[in-house]
Amino acid sequence: MATGYGSRQAAWKFFGTELKRRREAAGLTQEALGRQVFVSGGYIGQFEQAIRKPQLDVAQRIDDAPQTDGIFERMWKELISDSRYAEYFAAAAELEALATSICEFAPTLVPGLLQTAAYARAITTATNPFAPDEYIEEKVSARMDRAHLLKDPATPVYWAILHEHVLRLPVGGPQAMADQLARLAALARSRRVLLQVLPFSAGAYALPTGTLKLMEFEDAPPTAYTEAVFSGNLLDDPAMVKRAQGAYDLLRAAALSPEASLALIESAAEDHGQCASTT
């Protein structure tokens, strides 16, 4: 069942309230339930307060602990899961909306939060060549809805490192690409986002495969999300998040300065624009 963000958040809160009610009825503390489902008691508290959304497998283990006849799995699938996103990305999309800071590394494509509709449509069509127009437009609409996060003038703080390959690949054709890079340049000039480009000349770099998203929150531990081919991995183990943050620091050190990056983005936009004018 696809729902808007507000109704999904309300469902998430209902999940937490029901979890607390049933946990207390079973005589379990947060720590005791956490031990049974292999998460910390603090995480149970975050689920109950709707700070974090549990993964499906965690919801299933919660059902097993107080013997709830599968209610939390059903609730997760019917109320919380958002079919507009791939299942492996849905939890990360929810966390984006709660983050106070987001740092991304994109080696091949413009990050979803920065995409224009034309760029998003070209990617979605390329990966779903037999899908009907309605499906394509639903996915594009979901991506544009996510981008509303950046309409707030301050939150989240957003920092992205793009490999130069992202600037050169003409996704959607020269004009769509020129418009996409113009959007990136406008966001950078407005200082709403901080962009850096990792140039071809940097050679080998940390995290040579997949994307990386680091998220920080006001009242919860930081999280890292990595994505590869048709799979995503949400990392909240402190040691793993620290390693991901270290890799991002290496990328930041190897990238061009924001000023030089903006100049390269604008130059690439001009190149694509010239290609569009000659076709």
Image (cartoon, rainbow, N blue to C red):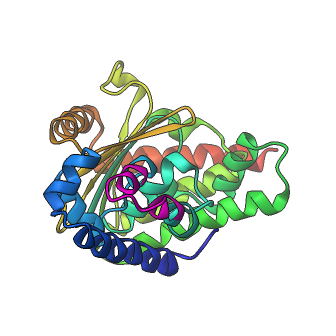
Residue found at the far top of this picture? 204
Which quadrant, please, contains the N terminus? bottom right
Q: Residue 147 at x, y = what percent?
A: 49, 66
Q: Is residue 268 above or below residue 114?
A: above
Q: Residue 56 at x, y = what percent?
A: 45, 51
Residue in the image at 19% along x and 63% along y: 28
Most common SS among magenta residues? helix
> Is residue 111 a member of the stretch shown in magenta?
no
Q: Nearer the viewer, residue 100 or 151?
A: 100
Q: Nearer the viewer, residue 152 or 69?
A: 69
Residue in the image at 25% along x and 38% along y: 248
Side of 160 relative to 144 (left or right): left
Side of 165 relative to 48 (left or right): right
Q: Is residue 272 above or below residue 137?
A: above
Residue in the image at 62% along x and 52% along y: 178
> Is residue 67 a member of the stretch shown in magenta?
yes
Q: Is residue 151 above or below residue 257?
A: below
For the question of whether residue 83 can be seen, the reply is: yes
Q: Nearer the viewer, residue 189 or 277?
A: 189
Q: Residue 59 at x, y = what percent?
A: 41, 55
Residue in the image at 66% along x and 61% along y: 140
Residue 256: quadrant of the picture: top left
Count of marks overlaid on the render: 0
Which quadrant, please, contains the C terminus? top right
Magenta extent: 60-74
For the question of whether residue 100 can be seen, the reply is: no
Q: Residue 270 at x, y = what percent?
A: 58, 49
